[in-house]
Amino acid sequence: MLLRLVDVQRHFGGVRAVDGVSLEVNQGSIQGLIGPNGAGKTTLVNVVTGYARFQGGRAWLESDELTGLPAHRIASLGIARTFQNIRLFKDLTAIENVLIGMHTRRRDDTLAQLATLPLFRSDERSRIKDAYALLESVGLPHSVGTRHAATLPYGDQRRLEIARALALRPRLLILDEPAAGMNPAEKQGMRELIERLNAEGLTILLIDHDMRLVMGVCKRVAVLNFGKKIADGTPDEVSTDAGVIKAYLGTGGDREVTSAPGASGVDEATEVEEAAVTSRAAREPDKAILDVEDLTVSYGAVVAVRGVSFRVAAGEVVALIGANGAGKSTILNTLSGLIRPESGTATFDGLDLANAKASAIVRHGLVQVPEGREILARQTVLENLELATWARRDGAATRKRIEDVMKRFPILGERRALSAGSLSGGEQQMLAIARGLLARPRLLLLDEPSLGLAPQMVDEVFRAIEEIHKEGTTILLVEQNALRALGVADRAYVIETGRILLSGSGDDLLHNPAVRRAYLGG
Amino acid sequence: MDFFFNLFSDPVGFWNSHTLLISQIGINGIIATSMFLVLYSGQLSLAAPGFMAVGAYTSVLMELYWHTPFAVNIAAGTLLAALGGLLVGLPVLRLRGVFLAIATIGFIEALRLGVILNVPITGEGLGLKHAADPLGGVPIILVSLVVTVFLVWRLTKGRLGSAWSAIRQDEIAALSQGINVAQYKMIAFVFSALLAGYGGALEAHLTFIVAPGDEQYGVTRAVQILTFAVLGGSGFVLGPLAGALIVTLLPYIFLQAGPYINVFSGIFLIAVIVFRPQGIVGRGGLAIVRPAWWPRARARAPSPG
């Protein structure tokens, strides 16, 4: 056994981020660690690697006790890690990044350097050679070596971070969401890299949200939820565990979910059969309030959206679903005038969205609730709402509208005097939606409303979305949480790498195995 | 313009008539190198004037009371400043960025206003007169400058320097590479204090008096030293040095402006910061003064083999 954790505890204020987790990682294995957002995975890693203090429990790497050691000592004992939000030395070149990783096994050459002795030149040469070999081993070409880390493409930065971690010659490599934000091809490459490193004898602890990656690559998987370990076993055991399904995928609300996506044992035949029945609701409406034709959007050389066409009729809820980086948010940002399309048209109730000013689009009744909520954390809830109506202050009428919105979201009324930053993630999302409603939208664009929320909170947010819809607002919803989005949507479009892959009624897509494959990059 | 004209037409005469200026450039260069060290390891410390004061007063007091030789006085002042660096560093190096800057300003002002102005042996507000030969030290200063810059440049090339680089870029990532961040920051801080103490001890012997003025050991001086680094750029050891040279020469560059000299100096500094925010000596070399035909600096990263 390489790594052993016993009853590890870590609290933040009253939140038990890691609440008595015990875990064992065997020599030469790939151990998976999964769990919904906010389950405490990264906190557990931070505790084990010395970035957060132990508040209970102990940990060993073979016979070396890790409890209470500072991060740099743990690193030199042989635990290397990557970070969820890549932390490279950005202004240094790729090769310099890897060379720094060799710090712990580099002889102290200070005096030799002062005297400019050639004594350590051969050391330096062999280090540089090693560094290039490491770049190669993670699949980065030679030419990347002299480039500054910040200028590398996203996938290469992830690989470089792994190369830097390998430079430590670790006994255990901890990867914190190495495939986050990658497209299916990149994910496949990352999977191959992880498997190859393991085949070379490296023990890996892998944390990721992508079930397909974790289930495919790991021999054992542990599941955290709200700081506690709720399951630990082989991928098959874990993915059929009732508790795991409820915690991890129970975001489907009242619908029965029988298996985790990516897990084997799902009866695909029935699903295909069901999907073959195309319901009337799946047809595109004839009379649309929003009409998007052949929309193409680029960021410089990168084409994010390729010839997308879809329509939304008044009174509908339409969902755009797809994995990270599919181009969903780009479509919304183009509709609300924040980005200009390269070609194609988008018309909202007679207004040409491709050329109208963002402010004119909002006045016309198309309002976006942005991803990540973008509330003003230091202002109170009331101030946030008041600022939303700042453009047209008409005294009593405005105040009445704010009161109405607070009635719709009673929790906001209760917390009106608190700073918005002190609200929970779900409450902040409510505030963001409420702020959008104040602009009196006819079409409300919601960008990832469930992002980073606990399952219960997701339920609440989606309940609110359904109610707003019932009151007559048309909604265009962008979500990664496909189960949830399809549950509320009349119709949905599945987006993959900038194209519409599938469309249909929410119910049809919910049971279509092709969705799962598109979505999980299979 | 006479000033620069003389420099080329009559170098020997220029040397003889501007000894004090040349010495001051040398001293400021040493202090700038001290500033470079802390910035290179990611620490916005403004403590240099405090350590300069330690070096200056220690050396002058030893000379006045114990009549020890010049070299011993300077060495004692330098070492005491380094010890001061260790003592100050222990509490303040937990802080980062602007908070560290404010804490170090607290240190220099507490030393100047609280200690120097209140302890009789320092001569309080009047300062101390001493009898060292002010001009005899010029060659020592220039040699010291060259040696200092060389040593610090070599340090940045070794294991120490690569650890400092990593810390400056991202402390958290540096920890994950097994770098003892606190220890390496302390090494840089103490070494920087040592250089500041040395520069301060030498500077005290440029004139016959050492006095606790704000422009000598206070915030004004701290800001001037920071300007060396901002103007010159803090990525390479020559950056702050170039900054020190320019800032020290500013009054001569704008000599013709007479009473408006500060206005012109200010406009010049702002222009550099606007057009060259990474400093005059940034990555890619002396971009502002490099003519188009000059070969581009090669990428710094080593290639294999």
Image (tube, coloured by chain):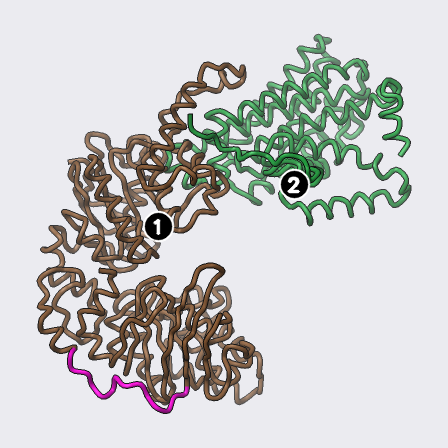
* Contact, mark 2 vs mark 1 (Cβ under 8 Å): no
Q: In this rendering, is residue A365 above or below A48?
A: below
Q: In this rendering, is residue B102 above or below B120?
A: below
For residue A26, which quarter of the picture?
top left
Residue at the (88%, 37%) spot, across then down: B255
Q: Colour of chain A?
A: brown
Answer left or right for A235 relative to A51: left
Q: In this rendering, is residue A365 above or below B305?
A: below
Could you say which chain is coloured green in the image?
A: B
Does A490 appear in magenta? no
Magenta-highlighted residues: A276-289
Crowding around mark 1 (Cα neighbors within 10 Å: few <14, some 14 to 19, many 20+) is: some
Name the residue tied to disc 1: A84
Identify the chain of the residue marked 1, using the numbered disc in the image.
A
Question: Is disc 1 placed on a helix, strand or loop?
Answer: loop
Q: Do marks 2 and 1 share a chain?
A: no
Visible in this render: residue A387? yes
Answer left or right for B37 relative to B127: left
The picture places residue A183, in percent across and down from the top left corner, at 32, 58
Looking at the rendered structure, the kind of residue marked 2 is Gly
For residue B171, which quarter of the picture?
top left
Give the position of the N terminus of chain A as an image quadrant.
Answer: top left
